[in-house]
Amino acid sequence: MLQAREPRTEAERVQREMLVCDFCRDDYAEKEGECVTVKIRHSLEGKTICAPCLDEHLPVTGCSFHGGSHGGYERDFLGTDEPPEGWAYPAPYWREVLAALAGAVPRDPEAQRPSKEIGRLDVAGELHRKLDEI
């Protein structure tokens, strides 16, 4: 198993302990769960983003449109398409978006549910457990 080498300088030690948003440059090391490094294939892959920067840099609607013969609208934690009129789903919470960006949960909210009867609160609880693992 690979082990990280010890920091050689004080600056390296401080850098390792920080979790800095690449957009606002704020340090989130003390605010667990409010900032993640994007680990999925995405335009932000490898970048670190905090919850307050989501609206400006990734304005999610929770809706994705897929064209083609079987195309249509679908729920997606990272979807940014304008939902159609009568869309029944709310935009995802910032914790859901961060969890999806970190790869802790699938982008499809329905994949989190064992059955259609389980509500949004159960999905949120699962997301909080996954975020704690990050």
Image (spheres, grey):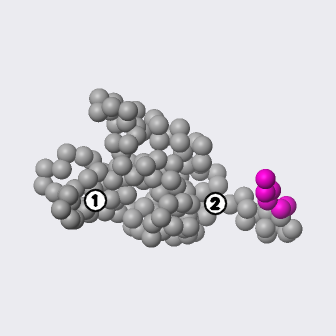
Local crowd at mark 2 within 10 Å, few (<14), some, or many (≥20)? many
Instruction: State left or right for residue 72 relative to residue 42.
Output: left
> Mark 2 or mark 1, which is nearer the start of the sequence?
2
**What kind of secondary structure does the magenta stretch mostly adopt?**
loop
**Which residue is located at x 38 percent, y 33 percent?**
114
Q: CA distance from mark 1 to mark 2?
A: 30 Å
The foreground one among 84 and 22 is: 84
Instruction: State left or right for residue 132 relative to residue 114.
Output: right
Q: What amino acid is found at the position of numbered circle 1 in the picture?
A: Ser
Q: Tell me: residue 124, above or below residue 85.
A: above
Residue 134, horizontal then vertical, whole percent: 60, 48
Local crowd at mark 1 within 10 Å, few (<14), some, or many (≥20)? some
The foreground one among 63 and 115 is: 115
Residue 2, horizontal then vertical, whole percent: 78, 57
Helix, strand, or loop for circle 1? strand
Give the quadrant of residue 133: top right
Any mark on residue 4, and which?
A: none
Q: What amino acid is found at the position of numbered circle 2 in the picture?
A: Leu
In magenta, the rendered stretch is 1-6
User: Is residue 114 in the magenta section?
Assistant: no
Q: Tell me: residue 23, above or below residue 3.
A: below
Count of numbered marks: 2
**Which residue is located at x 35 percent, y 63 percent?**
59
What residue is shown with label 2?
19
What residue is shown with label 1?
64
**Which residue is located at x 79 percent, y 69 percent?**
11
